């Protein structure tokens, strides 16, 4: 494999020569030399440089599209050849939305690594929108996401249902049940735009002709852990989060669930891959999850 393509893709993704050097553990002059060699070979400029700013030229965008495809094919070739010789090894890049990455995957990944120690597995987390984007940009091989949104360029396979619930601090004097109308007045801390959790909440409200903008949202935070800490320290504030994310807090009597009859807060977790994606290592990982969950 031409290592210059790996260098080029790293620079193109970071749009920064220094970060690419750090990622690949080589010097910045070496990065520049590899890029110059590619530009000389193809007789075209791949990057526009203006001070500290770097961006792809039109030729660079074309090069990136093909380079990513070549590197992906090479990874698959390595894996397939290893499988033919009985050596199950290779690289698997998994991305998971925040709830799944924090509360579902860690013990599963630990078990997978113990079963297949020669597989280099990396786990990236972000909200659902970020994971889908990473798949489309070939930065990860498999995504695990929440929510009902579907992109036509990706293939989704539901694997587990998840329930969301309205929670608050255990010392909150509110009753055990409220109406959907009463929900509108409660001070809420919710996940950020782009998260699968927020998408489910929006859909549940829409079924009752209500919008998120009609809710009393105090704050939006980028992780469920931040939300839990906020509520524990502000026990009169509420949030809607995955039950799987607050099991420990409910058992330890730090948080409690408030029922909202009629508000359907369910979703499915899904595996997601690019429509054209198919490799043995992806199939092996997905079979492992299907047999474990």
Image: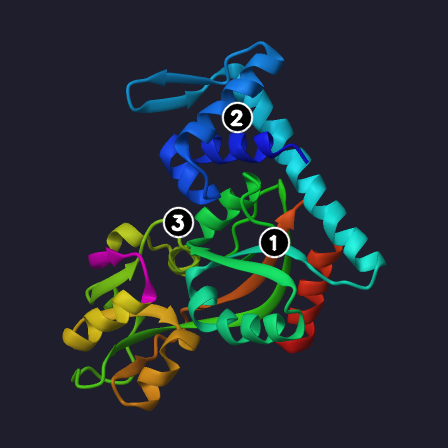
Seen from the viewer's position, the closer of residues 153 and 273 is 273
The quadrant of the rendering that contains the C terminus is: bottom right
Label 3 – label 2 distance at C-alpha: 37 Å
- Residue at 52% across / 33% down in the picture? 7
Residue, disc 3: 194
Q: Secondary structure at mark 1?
A: strand
Q: Which residues are magenta?
A: 215-224
Task: Say if the magenta span includes residue 216.
Answer: yes
Q: The residue tagged with tag 3: helix, strand or loop?
A: loop
For label 1, count other residues whose C-alpha is less than 10 Å away and answer few (under 14), some (14-19) or many (20+): many
| Observer-nearest of 67 and 244 | 67
In this view, the residue in front, 36 or 147, is: 36
Q: Which mark is residue 272?
A: 1
C-alpha distance separating marks 1 and 2: 34 Å
Q: Main secondary structure of the magenta part?
A: strand
Pointers 1 and 2 in contact (C-beta within 8 Å): no
The mark nearer the N terminus, 1 or 3, is 3
Residue visible at 40% across and 42% down? 22
* Residue 159 occupies quadrant: bottom right
Q: Which residue is mark 2?
A: 34
Whole-angstrom CA distance, mark 1 to mark 3, is 16 Å
Label 3 or label 2, whichever comes before in sequence order: 2
Left or right placement of residue 191 versus residue 26 in this view: left
């Amino acid at each position: 494999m031409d290592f210059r393509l790996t260098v080029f893709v790293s620079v193109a993704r970071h749009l920064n020569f220094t970060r690419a050097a750090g990622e690949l553990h080589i010097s910045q002059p070496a990065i520049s030399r590899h890029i110059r060699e590619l530009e000389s070979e193809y007789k075209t400029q791949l990057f526009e440089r203006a001070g500290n700013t770097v961006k792809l030229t039109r030729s660079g965008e074309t090069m990136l599209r093909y380079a990513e495809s070549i590197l992906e094919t090479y990874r698959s070739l390595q894996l397939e050849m290893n499988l033919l010789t009985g050596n199950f090894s290779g690289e698997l890049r998994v991305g998971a939305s925040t709830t799944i990455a924090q509360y579902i995957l860690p013990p599963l990944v630990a078990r997978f690594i113990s079963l297949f120690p020669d597989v280099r597995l990396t786990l990236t987390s972000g909200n659902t929108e970020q994971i889908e984007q990473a798949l489309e940009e070939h930065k990860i091989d498999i995504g695990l996401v929440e929510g009902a949104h579907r992109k036509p360029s990706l293939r989704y396979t539901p694997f587990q249902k998840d329930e969301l619930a309205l929670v608050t601090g255990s010392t909150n004097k509110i009753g055990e049940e409220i109406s959907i109308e009463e929900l509108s007045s409660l001070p809420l801390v919710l996940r950020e735009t782009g998260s699968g959790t927020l998408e489910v909440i929006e859909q549940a409200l829409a079924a009752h002709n209500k919008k998120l903008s009609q809710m009393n949202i105090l704050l939006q935070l980028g992780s469920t852990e931040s939300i839990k800490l906020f509520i524990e320290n502000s026990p009169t504030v509420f949030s809607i989060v995955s039950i799987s994310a607050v099991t420990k807090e409910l058992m330890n009597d730090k948080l409690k669930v408030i029922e909202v009859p009629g508000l359907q807060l369910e979703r499915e977790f899904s595996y997601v891959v690019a429509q054209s994606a198919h490799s043995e290592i992806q199939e092996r990982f997905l079979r492992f999850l299907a047999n474990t969950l």
